[in-house]
Image (tube, coloured by chain):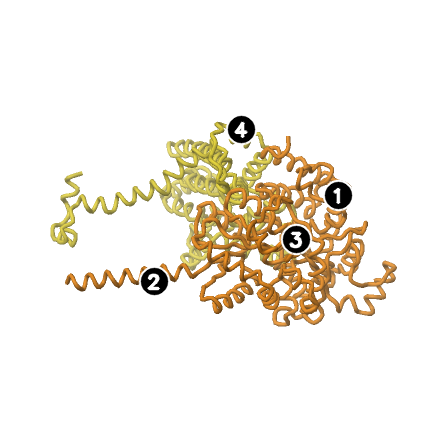
Chain colours: A yellow, B orange
Amino acid sequence: MADVMTRLEPDTRAAARGLSDLSIRNLFIIPTIAFLIIFNVFPLIYSLYTAFTDYRASTSAPANWIGLGNFRELLNDPNIWRNFTITAKYVVISVTGQVFVGFGLAMLLNRPIPLKGLITTLLLLPMMLSPAVVGLFWKLLYDPSFGIINFFLGLGKFEWLADPQMALWAVAIVDIWMWSPFVMLLSLAGLSAVPKHLYEAAEIDRAGPFYTFFRITLPLVAPILMIAIIFRTMEAFKTFDHAYILSTQPTTELIAIRLYKMAFLEWQTGMSSAFAYIVLIVVVAITNIYVKYLNKAKAR
Amino acid sequence: MHRSYYRLLTGAAAIALSASAASSQELTIFWAEWDPANYLQELVNEYEAETGVVVTVETTPWQDFQTKAFTEFNAKGSAYDMIVGDSQWLGAASEAGHYVDLTQFFNDNKLGEIMAPATVKYYAEYPGNSGKYWAVPAEGDAVGWSYRKDWFEDPAEMAAFKEKYGYDLAVPQDWNQLIDIAEFFHRPDQNRYGIAIYTDNSYDGLIMGVENALFSYGGNLGDYETYQVDGILNSPESIAGLEAYRKLYGFTPPGWSKTFFVENNQAITEGLAAMSMNYFAFFPALVNPATNPNAEVTGFFANPKGPNGEQFAALGGQGISIVSYSENQEEAFKFLEWFIKEETQKRWAELGGYTAHAATLESEEFRNATPYNEAFYQTMFMVKDFWAVPEYAELLTAANARIYPYIVGGEGTAKEVLDALTADWEETFRKYGRIQ
């Protein structure tokens, strides 16, 4: 460490001001660590404590320790299980859709086509938009009176968001539209890294396109595709913005929305902290499963 | 060097002192972002002219209003000196000590006699009949109806209506007529629809809408003193009210599944619906030709009677409270003393605010001031409100979750919905020790 510190050029401005390497480290690292402790670590530990209490931030009553009471109540609440079921369904629809659309687009773009750069940039635009804005304009697109989706699909005055069964699909379609470019981008990186000589060898061996895809392309892109799936699963699990804006159907009440209502509308602070930890455990568990698969794919 | 240093220091101290003196002459009122808040800002500008105290009305969109207000309360922040809070917050805010107890002020100024009885009961007092007051009724409001006079008065429509229903087409006198008229004008092929109602379940929109039917059909949400729900919320009258609201949903324009005050005014301004439910506070936009091309042909009426002759409407509106953490409470009390004066209340009404001041409300001048003031005056004497207990948000969440799928998706029956909601609410009351 001391070696690294002495490598600074003696004629730098910092040296001229008389700031020691230690001072520079303290100036930059200590504030960052303090920031992380105050805004990340402390809330994490404090919320873990409140998860075991009946604390309500809207009252001046002190927090009483109730042990696993909140966890017990949440896990016995059929409505919470319904929220988990809805979220699981949403994650499956959304991530599957994104993988198919994103990977399909990457396959198309991984060949010589005119204006490839421009097309790729345009395709990336949805994921650069704010989810709240996306929610608002998709609400207009889905409008049964003047929305262009019904117009193009010839669905008349079909109510995408008012239909309890269709609403979740409508929200998932928006997520697919928004985040398929992310999967496309990672897949494109993976596809461009596949050695060309493997395809040449397959061609010499007269391998068909399906054989080439399943035996060369997919296995080599799988690790990076798995990373995309991990990221998108974690993100889809905590979807809030566009789902909250698009629909208030109970059939689209994802866990993040339920958590928000519990914490900031009903002010059940202790209960919502416990709920947040349950969600965290679920996400970590799912991610671990994916990581195991990722490691297997890498080993192959 | 030293001299200039001390001069600088003296200057800075003087500035700091003057800033502190200035801040003691400033008051901040927090409210939701809507027209009445703009009218209040105009009114308080006059207070500033009289007293030199700068009063700012700070606003936030309705969707954030509750969250932002309670976040500030929970942090014991002094950003707001007063708040024009929703009536259902009274329990939560008073029990948590966020509001200053105004009982003494209320009694000294005889506000129980000066303000309209319903506004005292629902905007100021908590618990019910306790004689403890936490707010001064500020913006009286309730749900009323606007309608297309030209459609109603069209001779061809009148004849067709009479032939179909056997009575004259006119402003509905009861909920059966309201449903008939909505059905009559519901013509999707002509892009013309019967009625616009509240369906947004993200806060209290849908429940407020349903209350108009449920209360007028003779139903109730429960006994606010004993917390009994079973047999009241799921009574045959409440069930009939909920069924009536579901019927009305069938005559709304397409895509009417998440609508509140903005969309319901648009139903009239865009010529979509024959009748539209909304808070009176939003009616000024409907008589203004700049915002409503149909302003000349828009009429207003109070929520009609139910089949048994009972007539009620859902209460909106708010009272103004002093925030416990304000550093300017004395100044806030002085402001309230000015606000409750009869001349201030008259001016408040002139600017567009809905005064809760009984004498002003009852005056011919007020009742004839706009096409909707008469309906407002009638409504303010027949209002009922949602629960104001601290756990009201949990009750509201459960109500939205149960009622919305029935109204919008047609899932289950009204009886099943209200029975399930009764069980939910009883569980919540049991959790908070209100019932055994």
Image height check: is B349 above or below B199? below
- Callout 2: helix, strand or loop? helix
> Mark 4 and mark 1: span between their CA atoms?
34 Å
- Residue denoted by label 2: B18
> Residue at 55% of width from left, 46% of height from top?
A172
Image height check: is B318 above or below A168? below
Q: Residue furthest front?
A: B108
> Mark 3 and mark 4: span between their CA atoms?
38 Å
Callouts 1 and 2 close, C-beta under 8 Å: no
- The chain holding disc 4 is A
> Hey, what amino acid is under mark 3?
Leu
**Nearest to the observer: residue B229 or residue B164:** B229
Callouts 4 and 1 close, C-beta under 8 Å: no
Q: Is residue A134 left or right of residue B374?
A: left
Disc 4 and disc 1 on one polypeptide chain: no
> Mark 3 and mark 1: span between their CA atoms?
20 Å
Q: Position of residue A258 (x, y in %)?
A: 54, 41
**Nearest to the observer: residue B84 or residue A158:** B84
> Residue at 54% of width from left, 57% of height from top?
B32
3 or 2: tag closer to the N-terminus: 2
> Mark 1 and mark 2: span between their CA atoms?
63 Å
Numbered circle sitting on residue A72: 4
- The chain holding disc 2 is B
> Hey, what amino acid is under mark 2?
Ser
- Residue denoted by label 3: B315
Q: Position of residue B34 (x, y in %)?
A: 56, 60
3 or 1: tag closer to the N-terminus: 1
Callouts 2 and 4 close, C-beta under 8 Å: no
Disc 2 and disc 4 on one polypeptide chain: no
In this rendering, which labeled residue sits more in front, label 3 or label 1?
3
- Residue denoted by label 1: B239
> Hey, what amino acid is under mark 1?
Ile
